[in-house]
Image (spheres, rainbow, N blue to C red):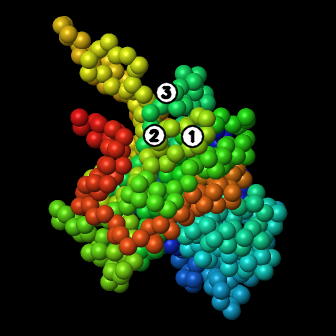
Amino acid sequence: MPTTSPAHTADLVVFGGTGDLSMRKLLPALYHSDRDGRLSPETRVIAMSRGGLTDADFRGKVDAEVRDRVPVDDPAVWQRFLGRLRHVSVDVGGADASGWEALARLLAEDEQRDRVYYLASPPRTFGPFCRELREAGLVTPRSRVVLEKPLGHDLPSAQRINDEVGAIFDEHQIFRIDHYLGKETVQNLLVLRFANAFLEPIWNSLWIDHVQITAAETVGTPGRRGYYDHAGALRDMVQNHLLQLLTLTAMEPPARNDREAIRDEKVKVLQALRPIAGTEVERFTVRGQYTEADGMPGYLDEPASTPPTEASRRVETFTAIRAEIKNWRWAGVPFYLRTGKRMPYRRSEIVVQFKDVPHSIFPGGGPNRLVLRLQPEEGIELHIMAKEPGAGEVTLKPVPLSLNFGTTFTARVPEAYERLLTDVLAGNPTLFMRRDEVEAAWRWIDPILSAWESSSDLPEPYPAGTTGPAGAHELLGRSGRAWHEEEEEL
């Protein structure tokens, strides 16, 4: 994996700079980077919005809304960070060009500086923003653009966005961000595989029974039904986050650790995914929607500005998929992908279930399991069988060999956006998605979406606070398997 780059001087221009993503994630991440010495003294953060704010207004807003989200143990560092902040009012799509002129004057103070345009806005704005940026003469060979997910809602819309942005920026200037790739455990997955000799020989179908990839959330969708009705769990989580984790788990060792070799291998995994289409969708996928339980509202009862519609009744808040990779390494090994809202726990993890020993001489044993936890506490656990202390008959018990990043390393574990922002400021695209990668993911997802949308069946209900609909458990149960947490309870 790439090492942390030295601080690069750049102007980071955030379109949607006063919005929720900026205030909750981007500005706290940038403050931490400043506090840890990863921002050069000259780097500026320029927020763009329609708010009509002055620099002082924006700094006051950040001081009021962001300061409580970060540990300000040195007021001088906080004031230094606030001093980096600027604000420019721009009406994208409007007739008034004065905002673009103001941004041009600000950037002209140092035209040799790298320019990073971060689009923290809906994907429908990506093309218009880039076009107006070019018309204002603000795209240079040293410019980069960062696109937040979701990148479209299907393959044609993703291709359209890629075409629009690609008409302004070259591919090497486009950084499609997925914050899961900035998590410490995700990066350690490749280190674990390719910097340690003991795992790679058994990282294949001869030794691995199956893989589970889970992203479970306890929260529902209060206030977000307008968005979620048209997104759903498959678009919102599987197409990007879970498929990214699958590619890193399943990819072949790259020939070298450079910017494109890792991304090349990830694309090969997506291209090797066995298509799920037609009648197979019902067999290999499950979709669900949470209902009221234990005082928690159902999806249709969540607070929202508009009443539920037919789209609300049909959207999935949970999905589970059995995927297969058609290549020599993974032939016959199922990859189970699962994500859901209103689950009993908040957990994102990759579970690699090894096959049982060929012949056990001890009763009560079980297979080994490698668990890579992304949240809430990042770490790695290798579950092995050990003898319980005591005289008499040998009794086996699974015990974990555990690596917890928070307790093992004295340094603070950076948030995902910190790492990704550091890389984009340095121009390192390794942890960002390439165009062919995004489109290969949609190419696999679209037939599932099409089958669901043409079906008269509604998502299977599951009570809020439970582990999902019965169909998700049957998906594994048909082959004698169970979800990780169910096996832990046995």
Residue in the image at 40% along x and 77% along y: 311
Q: Mark yes or no: residue 294 visible.
A: yes
- Is label 2 in a helix, a strand or a loop? strand
Circle 2 packing at 10 Å, graded few (<14), some (14-19), many (20+), is many
Is 214 left, or right, of 415 in this rendering?
left
Q: CA distance from mark 3 to mark 2?
A: 12 Å
Circle 3 packing at 10 Å, graded few (<14), some (14-19), many (20+), is some
From the viewer's side, name the closer residue of 388 and 321: 321
Which badge, 1 or 2, comes first in the chain's sequence?
Answer: 2
Instruction: Give, as a three-letter code, the residue at label 1.
Output: Ala
Residue in the image at 29% along x and 37% along y: 487
The x, y position of residue 396, in whole percent, is 27, 19
The x, y position of residue 360, in whole percent, is 34, 16
Is 169 left, or right, of 448 in this rendering?
right
Residue in the image at 24% along x and 69% along y: 297
Which badge, 1 or 3, comes first in the chain's sequence?
Answer: 3
Q: CA distance from mark 1 to mark 3?
A: 14 Å
Name the disc covering residue 207, or none.
3
CB atoms at circles 1 and 2 under 8 Å apart? Answer: yes
Residue 135 occupies which quadrant of the picture?
A: bottom right
- Is label 1 in a helix, a strand or a loop? helix
Figure quadrant of the C terminus = top left
Name the disc covering residue 211, or none.
2
Q: Mark yes or no: residue 240 visible.
A: no
Is 86 left, or right, of 105 in this rendering?
left
- Is label 3 in a helix, a strand or a loop? loop
Seen in the picture, residue 398 relative to 5 is either above or below; the reply is above
The residue that mark 1 highlights is 250
